[in-house]
Image (tube, rainbow, N blue to C red):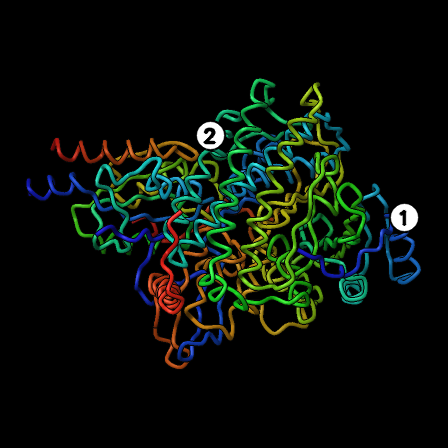
Amino acid sequence: MRAIVPIGPFHPLQEEPEHFRLHVDGETVVGLDIEIGYNHRGIEKLAESRTWDQVVFLVERICGICSTSHPIASVQAMEDCGKIEVPERALYIRSIIGELERLHSHLLWVGLAGHFLGYNTVFMWAWRYREPVCDLFEKICGNRQHYAMMKPGGVRRDIPESMYDEIVKVMDDLVPAFDLFKGAVLDDPVLHARLKGVGVLTPKDIHDYCALGPTARASGVAKDVRRDHPYAAYGKVDWNVITHPAGDVFAKAVVRVLECYESAKIIKQCVQKMPRGPIDSDPKQIGPGEGIGHHEAPRGETFHYCRSDGSNRPVRYKVRAPTYMNLPTNYRAVIGQSVTDATIILAAIDPCYCCTERVSAVDRRTGELKYTPKDLIRLSREKTEQLRREYGVKEPVL
Amino acid sequence: MTREADMGGSNDSAETIAAELSRRFGSKLLGSEVRSEKRVYIEVAPRDFREMALFLWGEKKCRFNIASGMQTPSGFEVLYHFSWNEGDETGPGGGKGVVVSVRVRTSEKERPVLVSVADKIKALDFIERELHDLLGIEFEGRADLKPLLAAEDWPKDFFPLRRTERRAELDYGDITR
Amino acid sequence: MGLLIKALAKSPWVFHLSTGSCNNCDIEVIDALTPRFDAERFGAVLVGSVRHADALLVCGAMNRKCVPRVKRIWEQAAKPCLVIAIGSCALGQGIFRGSYAVGEPVDKYLPVSAYVPGCPPKPEAILLGVVKALEALKGK
């Protein structure tokens, strides 16, 4: 029998500190501890002893899935600080790379959600459809992940015109895949029963926690850095900010799937409109001052701040990933919910991948470990199975 | 998919924002600079920060982005970054978002203390704890400053982002074997 | 022992461990299981407990908080268990070397049999690393 693909390490040791520790009373989550020190790598301190160029490579490795979102925010912070111009072609290339990343990230999330909910074919197919995007990255940038495309003043590599047709073709070929997920998954009555009304965040919750990205837009809060603070080529092409009023996990899934269509649209327009010309203004220094750069990463806004004294290293460098703001919304979203829904609610904000693997549940009264991460995923999948029996449907085969 | 009525969003330019803050806060505004059409930097004293934060977030419905703290030769400073003007109706290309950064300075060199606003603005909880872990800034007005990023075995006086912190390596005893 | 090694090499059960990283290596490890790369044709299966594992795939820069956990997991692994370090961070902490928040590289704590460099290594490289480590074991 084929082993279920578990995401990440699981270990039933009670004293193992977790990213998320749920406190349960019966089957209801009544409390939540969030601990995030496990991924702390001291990047801000490291940045103070790196040159500006090196900082861009460093921040790229904050997160693998939102790999280019940090460099985009980073170089914009440096350009803001040093009042550096960027050639127009480079702006379009930045948007193309940013949107390609959004595609692969959202597809990855759809796959993970499928895994947690017991839709293994969705997992396999979503990750399979990521591959053409990763291949495009490899052709453009030389690496499937960590693209090393951004530099202050522009981008490091050009997209040759010979690749334009291929990029457009990959986008056109992906649209049927988006339709597949939209149809087979979002029109599934079991998923409606499973996800609607689950893990709801109201617009007030979004405002209290200053949540962002699809997490906010799925509660009807229409904030998107690409539109609100236009940068790169986002102000020059036609696209929509996707929102959904319900605020539940279902809404978050809908927003992400629909954003895929918008990303493909943006990429195609950028390829068609991109002017010829230089891709790098080749600045020689970042003058003294302060700069802020931000980018709408797949999970929300990445925000970087830098301070320069005119030398070749930052005096101070601050990074804020989107999940930092979205994580605490779980205090609202998961408390009061059933433990069978805990995994998918926590995954719904699309946190750092390693956060989703480290969830456990302890009994509120005794403090004893009740459910390991593997148990919680199993509970989630069992609930889906039960609903499938009730509705008389089978797992969709795509 | 319909868009719900946006919270805030007013199409104010950076200049009008700076002017409004000046009118509202008068002499409490220790500094104000419009660096570009998207960047406003202002300064208030630590004791006035709470009022400023609640005005920006509560009244003006700004979104709090993050706070960046650092040690300076004269003490400590923290910049709180807010986004003003989001969610306006003008569509792609028309966004007039402005980042308003509020600087708060203290000349206390060993045990800096600032005022917490995390009871009202929940989004401030994590960053106040982080500023405490990494810079040793205390926040009065909040119940606990539980460590956020610090490992249990960090020395009590270890604040890695302080420039006066000379230790490059921490002594972890027999961690290697 | 010979039969054990033969069995292990034929169908390695692998346990994946992340020690504080950007997760790209972790994603590429999972990717190796998807249809395109299909680790299962080598008999490699990802298991949920280190007690069932024949090989430990370690990614990450060894964040200090993770070090006791890594040691504990190694103690629980049934020997023989191969340790394969995946990605620049696991090899030498990669771009994070020198940070106050990371300990020493994996091979200061665990006996590493194979190193798969890359940031991140491609799934093909990861599969090659696992296969090579197993071949080396068979050859013993």
Quadrant of res A331: bottom right
Residue A64 placed where, x, y %? 49, 42
Element carrying mark 2? helix
Against A195, residue B160 (above or below) is: above
Q: Amino acid at mark 1?
A: Glu
Chain of residue at mark 2: A
Q: Residue at x 55, y 46 (%)?
A: B166
Q: Residue at x 61, y 19 (%)?
A: A161
Q: Residue at x 51, y 72 (%)?
A: A335
Residue A264 placed where, x, y %? 59, 37
Q: Nearer the viewer, residue A117 or A35?
A: A117
Residue C84 placed where, x, y %? 28, 39
Quadrant of res C130: top left
Q: Nearer the viewer, residue A38 or B171?
A: A38
Residue A217 placed where, x, y %? 64, 56
Query: Nearer the observer, disc 2 or disc 1?
Result: 2
The residue that label 1 is drawn on is B15
Marks 2/1: CA distance? 46 Å
The residue that label 2 is drawn on is A135
Asked if badges 2 and 1 are on one and the same chain, I answer no
Q: Is residue A353 visible?
A: yes
Q: Nearer the viewer, residue A310 or A216?
A: A216
Element carrying mark 1? helix
Q: Nearer the viewer, residue A169 or A99?
A: A169
The residue positioned farthest toward the front in the image shown: A392
Q: Amino acid at mark 2?
A: Asp
The residue positioned farthest toward the left in the image shown: C2
Using residue A373 as the reference point, say whether residue A314 is left or right of it. right
Q: Is residue A15 visible?
A: no
Against A128, residue A147 (above or below) is: above
Decide: few, some or many residues near mark 2? Use Cα within 10 Å; few <14, some 14-19, many ≥20: some
Chain of residue at mark 1: B
